[in-house]
Each structure stands twice: as structure tokens, then as C-alpha cells.
Amino acid sequence: MHVRFKHHLSDVVRLQALLLNGGIYLDADMVVLRPLDPILHHDITMGLIENGTGMGNAFIAAKRNSNFMREWYSHYNIYNNTEFYKNSLHVPRDMWLRDPSRLHMESHRLYRPNWFEADLLFRRSDYDWSDNYAVHIWTNGNPVPKSEEEIQTANTTIAQIFRYVLYGDSKPRTGFVING
């Protein structure tokens, strides 16, 4: 297996780990917002970013030796070095499209807002994320709050999410003291 793009080396490793052990894979920029128990009884749970992009692989919950994972992994033996998204995003999407019963889909509760909707996360504050299991923080060039003060006071969806995770309440905080 000759994998050209370094991003895809991590794809191969995550598939190997999930095949051998089962479990949950999360990219470092996935923020879990609620218990995942309701989706863990499926053989595999993923989400579609959107049809043109393909299946998101920043969140994968899979049982050990899942048939879906095994087939997806086998496609890396015919790795396409010319199409960046082919093996990592298009192959699992196409497998799901051929037989939707093989995969539990949680697109909106894992990948909304998606990377085409970055304004909903980083510039607006009106996206209802309360039903999400997780949110993928599309950090590439987006204005992620970088200080405690920004997290505490920013009027953006991403700041709401960070406050919820850190403090249990998404409302802006005032009168905070930064220890230092």
C-alpha cells in the first residue's frame, strides 16, 4: 500500500485501530457535546459532510472488525494517488449509497455546521447546536477564540459551544477573573 498524502496515513491508522479494537475515533478538532451511548449500539456510525465532499471521517464509532470498516480499508490496497478525497471520503460515501443499511448515519448531529457553513460557527451566534452529539471545529483559517477572554465574551456559536463544554452554560460570562 503506497499512500501519497500524509493525511491519508492517519486514515489508514485509524481504520486499522478500529478494525482491531473497535471504539470511537475523533479528530482533535471534534468537540463532543453529549453522551454518545445512543449511537454506540450500531456496527458503525458516521456522518456525511455533504454529498459532494463525502463521508466525514473525523468521527467514527465502530464495532471491532466491522464489515463496513474492513471493506473500506481494503480500498486502500487500490489507493488513488491522484484524487485527494477518493479513499478517505468518497469510498465510504459510495459504499453507504450502495447499501444505506450498513451504516448508521448522523450527519447533522456530527457535521453541522459543515465547512461550507463556517460562518454559522465563527461569525454568527444563531445556529442551534443543542441536538448535536459533536461539532467539528473547522479550524483552517477560521477565527477560533484564542484566549479565555474571547471564549468568555464572544458572541459566536463556537464561543457558545466552548463555554458550554468548559462551564456547563453557553451564555457569555462577565466579571470573570483570569488567574495568572
Image (cartoon, rainbow, N blue to C red):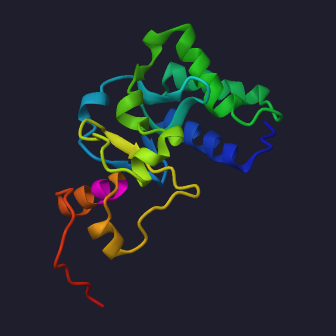
Q: In the rendered structure, which segment of residues is drawn in magenta?
A: 158-162
Residue 138 against residue 70 in the figure, above or below: below
Residue 95 on the magenta segment: no
Q: Residue at x 51, y 50 (%)?
A: 138
| Image quarter of the C terminus | bottom left
The location of residue 165, given as percent across then percent down, is 26, 57
Residue 22 visible here: no
The location of residue 26, given as percent across then percent down, is 45, 46
Q: Residue at x 64, y 25 (%)?
A: 90
Residue 59 visible here: yes
Residue 159 on the magenta segment: yes
Residue 44 against residue 133 in the figure, above or below: above
Front one among 93 and 155: 155
Task: Classify residue 30 as left or right of residue 127.
Answer: right
Front one among 83 and 69: 83
Front one among 162 and 63: 162
The location of residue 112, given as percent across then percent down, is 41, 36
Task: Classify residue 161 as left or right of residue 116.
Answer: left
Toward which corner of the image does residue 37 lie, by quadrant? Answer: top left
Q: Residue at x 36, y 54 (%)?
A: 158
Q: Residue furthest bottom?
A: 180
Task: Classify residue 53 as left or right of residue 146.
Answer: right
Front one among 134 and 6: 134
Q: Determine the main secondary structure of the stretch shown in magenta.
A: helix
Toward which corner of the image does residue 8 lie, by quadrant? Answer: top right
Task: Classify residue 143 as left or right of residue 154.
Answer: right
Residue 149 against residue 84 in the figure, above or below: below
| Image quarter of the N terminus | top right
Q: Total label count? A: 0
